[in-house]
Amino acid sequence: MTAPKVLKLDPHDNVLVALTDLPAGATVEHSGQTYTVQTLIPAKHKFATEDFAINTEVMMYGVIVGRVREPIARGGLLTTSNVAHDAAGFSGKQSNYKWVGPDVQEWQSRTFNGYHRQDGQVGTRNYWLVIPLVFCENRNVDALREAFEEELGYGRPKKYRQQVHALLQEYRQSGSTPTAIPADSTPAPDRIFPNVDGIKFLVHQGGCGGTRDDSRALCGLLAGYIHHPNVAGATVLSLGCQNAQATDLFEELRKRDPQFAKPVLLFDQQKSGLESTMLSDAIHATFQGLVEANKFERQPAPLTKLTVGLKCGGSDGFSGISANPAIGYVSDILAALGGKSILAEFPELCGSEQNLINRAEDSQVADRFIQLMRAYQGRAKAVNSGFEMNPSPGNIRDGLLTDAMKSAGAARKGGSSPVEDVLDYPEYVKATGLTLLCTPGNDVECVTAQVGAGANIVLFTTGLGTPTGNPIAPVIKLATNTKLAQRMSDIIDIDTGPVIDGATTIQSMGESILDLVIEVANGAKHTKAEGLRQDDFIPWKRGVSL
């Protein structure tokens, strides 16, 4: 079967998407109509299906994605010169949403082997965290990183390494050293704690000097990471005088779980006196924490224990056609099973708001989404910016000319299931099904927030090649096109390009993605981002970030 050359995404659209390069003068057919393209139409770009006068609304995915500002002839290429951003307005919930979910019978008995926590959450990994409450402690976090990581053979000897070495020797001599578990993607066989996937050291530039709201949000985010099912416990370093106080952190932890019981080892430098005293105490206590964390073993869990973040970054004109709807189908399967998924990136939902509002479980959920979207847009306008400035040069070069055009494709990551809840940053996910989380579109800020909200796996689609990862949650990278998957195979986990070629369907691709999610959740397979130690972590300060 010959692969299609063009695609119309919705019957109401007045543009066609080129699936391959169309030279000037070429003729293409679609739905009984013949079109002659006026100039080269690069793959991923769009051309007019009729003569466009100035102020004509450009329609894609059945919604307004732009407005014509220069006449465009039938078959003419849409560009940033002749099309400007425009989007439909939105208001309250207008109708009751009826959803028929996918058939999930074959998935109901599927399980993954995860780490069961006391609060009922199940982790896909088992990490220990070392985090500072304030940027003043970043250097000391780095000292602990050197002490623990270097002792595992990753570099030259550093200060404090000898102490960790002595503790390791003592542990070995005690006769209780567990046997390493051989597997194709596990660390070297001499790993001391085979059930601990690693120690993750998170540094940041917050905690003091900004607004109190920033510090409170940081404490909420850090609490989300400590509470996260992929974390067994945490070592926290505090200077003592900063805005982000330990009491704030523990208050945020209790918000997420009133019965919070994980070990959190707190060290206050101003109370310890000598820096070396604090670090020595932290090393000893952290080592003992690792001993306890190693006692967790993987046990079967239903797929309802998965919480999947849905993210796109480095998007192209194929993102909304292949990878995004494919992970949207995964989201729908999880919703039908009773699992959780998180759709974020509020600037990249511009123009798709009404559809999401109408899908809201009730008016209260819809109204909160409206309030957060309008407040975010208002903050952007207050500094002479706006969602229309969201597309990057790479997005534009590969066919995403306006924010609404980008957003219409980005929203497809959320599938078609009802919107069960709406969260503000850095709240933690509660509802089963699809949750909307207020974050920027910025790749690392968004993924950082999604994991802080409880995502134990992230599905990240990219059309241009974005190497984003996360310290504690596996990030599965999906290419929107086969050329990218082949060119940047070191960062791509799965190629959704066959959807563009017509070789497979969205449903089949979504099922293949969920199979991979289960493999990764089991620990049987590590993602490319994990292999590259792509441990990106950037807290969002509630200023304007698109």
Image (tube, rainbow, N blue to C red):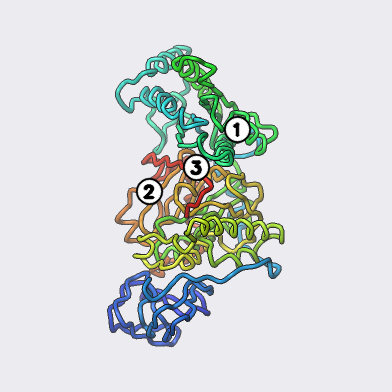
The image position of residue 32, as x and y in percent, is: 44, 87
For marks 1 and 3, the one nearer the N-term is: 1
Q: Residue at x 47, y 59 (%)?
A: 385
Question: Circle 3 is placed at which residue position?
Answer: 539
* The label number, if any, that marks residue 249 in the structure image: 1
Which residue corresponds to the image point at 44% horizontal and 78% vertical from the top-left? 68
Residues under labels 1 and 2: Cα distance? 30 Å
Image depth: mark 1 or mark 2 in front? 1
Q: Which residue is mark 2?
A: 467
Indicate left or right for 337 with 6 as reference: right
Work out whether 116 lies above or below 336: above
What is the secondary structure assignment of the residue under circle 3? loop
Image quarter (top left, top right, bottom left or bottom right) of the N terminus: bottom left
Q: Amino acid at mark 1?
A: Leu
Residues tagged 1 and 3 counted as in contact (Cβ below 8 A): no
Q: Which mark is residue 224?
A: none
What percent of the width, then of the height, locates residue 183?
42, 36
Question: In this rendering, does residue 400 appear at all?
Answer: yes
In primary-sequence order, the first of circles 1 and 2 is: 1
Mark 2 surroundings: few (<14), some (14-19) or many (≥20) residues within 10 A: many
